[in-house]
Amino acid sequence: MSTTTTSSTTAPEGVINASDILAQNKFSSHLVEKEDSLLYDLGNLCAFDFSSLNKAEYNENPEEYINKISRDNVQLLITRMFQLDSKVVESGALALLPKPLTPIPRMKPIPEAKQQTRWEAFAAIKDIKKRKKDSKVWDETHKEWRHSWGYKRANDEGENFAMYANPNNPEQDPFQKLIDDKKERVDKNKRLEQRNLDESHKRSSSMVGSNNGLDFSKENRGQIKNDVRNTLNVAKVSTASMGKFDKVLEGDKKLPTRGVKRLAGLGDNNIQGESENSLKMVKRILNKEEGILNVDKATNQFITNENKENMKKKFKDGGRPIKKSKK
Amino acid sequence: MSSIKPSIDRSVGRSRQMSKSAKAKAFLRSKESQEVEHYKQAMMIRGKWSSQIIQNVLKDFYILKKPNAVQYNKKNDIYPMESAESIEFLGEKSVSGLFAFGSHSYKRPHNLVIGRLFDDSVFDMYEFSVLNYKGMEQFQGATTSRLGNKPCFIFNGAEFENDPITKRIGNTFLDFFRGHVVEYINLAGLDHVIILTAVNGRILFRHYSVLFKRSGTKVPRVELEEMGPSFDLELRRSKIPSEDVEKQALKIHRSVQPKVVKNVDSNDLGEKHGRIHLGKQDYNTLAFKKTKALSKRKQSNHHSTASHSSNDI
């Protein structure tokens, strides 16, 4: 130790001493005899020692051997834990753990992303932030803070023993109107909630016949119409004869046909055309070499074309080229 | 065609279970899948026939796993390796992702099944015979850890890396006992360690309390004191997950996935390499090798150049 101190004082500033680094790195050298060959997953407070188990030594005295290597391994793990970044609190030091490395299976699958409600989508576009209302509101008549809603709420009109009648409709009971309006608002809210729920239920299948949830929003109408048509067409010709001997119903022009897959120009008695096509194809394949770009040829062609263009520009008026004035 | 109209089913979107009380709502919410899962609850299930050893093992597991543990101590007529339906039912009921099942029979004495659930069905499970059991009671006088402190883990033996089944067993034990996933940990709370050693075809489970002694440096000197339970496990049967289920279960939610840093990587020496995109090259300013064909013609003999240029190349 004394040598390191003397050398560090004699060495000029900025020069790092190898012995100093060694002294720093051997943090726990006096605590552990073995070399640190462990793999760590500090996020799970976990260390893996794949290499240092000696079976011969274990068989000699199992319990003692396990106690010995365990202590060393735990010491190495604890040393690592104490080297983590930490912050000091009253009860001790809190070490900041890295993210766990060992892959651990989940308990439930990842939740699907929630669909936005119509209001949430609108608010996102308009950049409307959610504001928290105060739960208590000042009540003018009672001169006190009251809950903004519910029993004994602030500024409750229905609490009044008398109310002004509507001048346009004096027959109407204003108390009943309050109740009716409230009911209407509640119903509307329920209706909109149901609509949001329906819309959020994504359609997962393209065919109408399957019993999965469907999205009946406006954007999907065309798709649904198509699906219905296709399903119906398939159903119409799904008889033993594939629709061949079925009667055409009144109002239907003809039975839908199943798409026939065949190559165009093949097997329709045009032997000459067929052979011509084949020859063309063979030629194209065999003469492929010619098609490769000749770089020299292309470059020369490009240069001559450019020269021509330049000449055209110069002799636009048909006269002599305009000389640039020298400065 | 107009006769076929999609009838609007009002119950279409009603996938949410309706509940009236706040407590019931909270309970249902606890059953829903989470973006990030912080812990799993474990069930300790007693079989129809069980030995004292097996019952003690389950009790010790329960103590180690508290408070995220439930006990099913009645005689349950379940055979997990044959049919796991009941386990899955109990798992769904108690919102648990882990289970330990103990039984004892002439054919399979001191039988312990440890497994995990994924999406309310068994993900994987391993059946062991328990040997050389020493309970927590037999280590009385030893310093005990505080309830709820996260244990440290040491895995000794190459089998935890090389043997796929042993590797999975190690993973299961880590999952079983690690407790909550946390960001910070109190260093003074590192007071017990579970040590699993794979040797001679067995897995040895040892549980020690950790004592910190002064060492003269910031890092304390560690002393271990065995506090039990201590037992050896020999694998009997196992059930591992199918590939696609495993893939599903190992998915990480986007919100906690590390952000991908584009165009920056490091080589084996630890040097940082960046990749820069320069955009499209401008061929008009390209520096060619000087050739006669590319050099500008002199102004004076423009007539001759015009006559020389031809198209038949």
Image: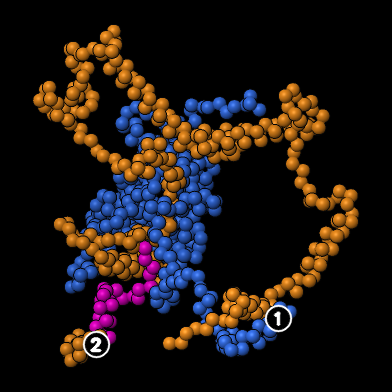
Q: Colour of chain B?
A: blue
Question: Which mark, by number, is residue A15?
Answer: 2
Within the image, what quadrant is residue A50 found in? bottom left
Q: Residue at x 29, y 7 (%)?
A: A171
Residue B308 in picture, x, y percent from top left: 68, 85
Q: Which residues are magenta?
A: A17-41
In front: A10, or A173?
A: A173
Q: Is residue A265 left or right of residue B110?
A: right
Residue A161 in picture, x, y percent from top left: 17, 12
Identify by letter the chain in orange: A
Residue A21 lies in the magenta stretch: yes
In the figure, A172 relative to B273: above or below?
Answer: above
- Residue type (three-letter) at the residue carrying disc 2: Val
Q: Secondary structure at mark 2?
A: loop
Q: Residue at x 53, y 27 (%)?
A: B8
Question: Which mark, by number, is residue B310?
Answer: 1
